[in-house]
Image (spheres, helix red, strand yellow):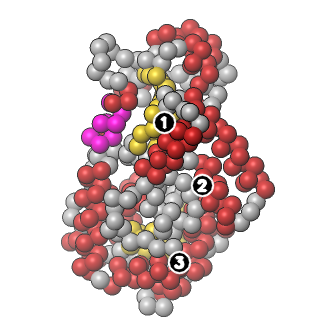
Amino acid sequence: MQQLGVEVLHGGEYVGKFADWVAENGRYLDVVILNRPHIAVDYIQPLRQHSRARVLYYGHDIHHLRMQQQLQLQHDAAVHAEMLRFRDMEWAMWRDADVVLYPSDEETTHVRHWLHAHAGKAQACTIPLYGYANVAGDQTTSLAMRRDILFVAGFAHPPNVDAATWLVQDILPLVQLRHPQVHLHLVGSNPAASVQALAGPHVSVTGYVSDTELAGYYARCRVATAPLRFGGGMKGKVLESMCHGLPMVTTGVGVQGLAKAGFLPHADSAQALADAICILLDDDAHWCDISRASTAFIDAEYSKAALWRVLVEQLGAGRGRARKYIMIDG
């Protein structure tokens, strides 16, 4: 970032001293972008005290709603306490920011309702989760060489652990009734012991792979899946699969924020998910339709141009003098 001309505050000399820094430099700031509630909540008051900057809060998802979904599957006192802690932090950010950005229309609508009910003054807007520069071309020529099922995820995240377990224990056996030789690849970093234990003759658990290796999985596999039973926000793994032109089978949780992607196969029972996977394993024409629709959707909705349209409007770029921005992330 520094090589791009971005000033970065880092190193031990800044630890615990943001209030001092912003007291000296806050008058130079025009816009501040805050990320992650447990990080952002500690910075907004010093910014309000020492600057007149426009404060944008970007929520990757609504954490407390995701935890509420998790609690519906199994109550856990520690998760409940954490849900309440994140709820209070997220509400504080919605109350105190000038603009609240989320990557799905459903989340934006939820925030707008909350702001209306609590006399909040912030503006809630939807922003594309990614701005893809390179969307895959026509993948149909590779169809004859494709096989197997792919689930890409970071397995330190509880929703992904639950999804992998459900996939291997309940969904895959139903697929194997019709495709006994099909292989499942669980690809991603930090596989917990419970995920590693899922490995077997027809299931591989890779751990972390490089971007090049990951692209290889997207090019070789026939179906991607993300059988998520809880989780907030739009799912990057779903968008990434579509960007590669690999048909994705997911759940109602997996298609949150993707109302415009009505072509995406999704279901919430193990049998229906297995059926959708098998159709893509069997039906070449259906596979080609979903692959082409996926890349066209990403090209139209998740390009760099779509991302910058929202950012430029909210950053206030182009209004007079050059502007100074600060982004704070964990």
CB within 8 Å, label 1 to label 3:
no
Q: Secondary structure at mark 1?
A: strand
Quarter of the image holding residue 311? top left
Label 3 to label 2: alpha-carbon separation: 19 Å
Where residue 312 sits in the image (x, y, percent)? 32, 30
- Look at the numbered disc 3 and give the secondary structure of its residue: loop
Whether residue 120 is visible to the viewer of this picture, yes or no, is yes
Residue 217 percent coordinates (x, y): 39, 65
| Residue 307 part of the magenta segment | yes
Q: Is residue 274 left or right of residue 44?
A: left
C-alpha span from label 1 to label 3: 34 Å
Q: Which residue is mark 3?
A: 269
Looking at the image, is mark 1 or mark 2 earlier in the sequence? 2
Magenta residue span: 305-312
- Of all residues, the one furthest to the right in this rendering is 77
Residue 100: assigned label:
1
Residue type pointed to by label 1: Val
Residue placed at 53% from the left, 79% from the top?
270
Which residue is labeled 2 in the image?
66
